[in-house]
Image (tube, grey):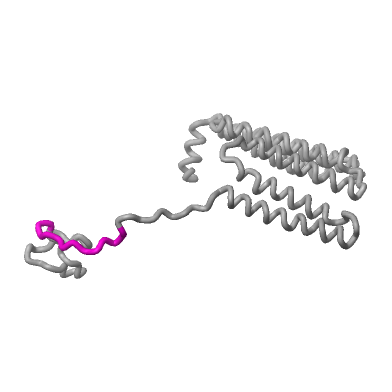
Amino acid sequence: MYCIKCGVELSDSEEKCPLCGTVVFHPDVKRVDGEKPYPAERKRRETANTSAVLFVLTMLFVIPLVMCLLCDFKVNDRIVWSGYASGAIVLFYIVVVLPMWFKRATPVIFVAADFAAAILYLLYIDLAVGGGWFMPFAFPVAGGMMLISCAAVALLYYLPHGALFIIAGTLIATGGFMVLVELLLNSTFGLNTKLIWSVYPLAACLLIGIMLIITACCPKLREALRRKFFI
């Protein structure tokens, strides 16, 4: 016979374990029925309704939005600064809370919706300040970021086994996009006449992308890296 706690061997006459003091369990001795640790019927915990939680979150966004508009209109008799705050609140709601309303939806849809909301917000700012930078700079930059992000998310969602190739292609495309951003900055705001900083992220993205492609094409290298870094 052995102790049920520490495993030390016991004689048949032992009532307590001499090592840890645990009462010896004799399976042949009938146990006295005591009070059960849990009641026979346990009440199920009430879970919060998802729709109710999302409604509360929505109200937490609506209230400051309405308050900003009312305060601005009360003080200035027109919309002056509240448009920026309200637009930021709406944008944050679309990015964070809107996906929670849907149980099953393609992620690329929400990525596109986030970028579309950001583009509209930038358009409002450009029109409010009369900057004239939306079409020559903000729209192509935001649109290019949306295309790269949506393509990467869609490919990762539908082709998960080609993740290394997709990430490599996304990095290379991002490096080329940095060159486009600098060209648009130079042409819109007249900063420089040649490329200065965009060649560095382009080179880094190209090197990392090529490294990932080589890794994806070599199963032995992938296995060695997986064992080396425990991934």
**What is the magenta segment's predominant secondary structure?**
loop
Residue in front for this viewpoint, 210 or 152? 152
For this orientation, the residue located farthest to the left is 13
At 19% from the left edge and 70% from the top edge, which residue is drawn?
21
22 vs 87: above or below: below
Q: Residue at x 50, y 31 (%)?
A: 219
Give residue 77's position: percent from left, percent from top. 90, 58
Query: Which quadrant holds residue 203?
Result: top right
Residue 210 percent coordinates (x, y): 64, 34
- Is residue 48 something that shows in the picture? yes
The image quadrant where one finds the N terminus is bottom left
Asked whether 83 falls inside the magenta stretch, the response is no
Residue 216 falls left or right of residue 43? right
> Residues in magenta?
27-39
Residue 31 is one of the magenta-drawn residues: yes
Left or right side of 109 for 217: left
Q: Residue at x 71, y 50 (%)?
A: 92
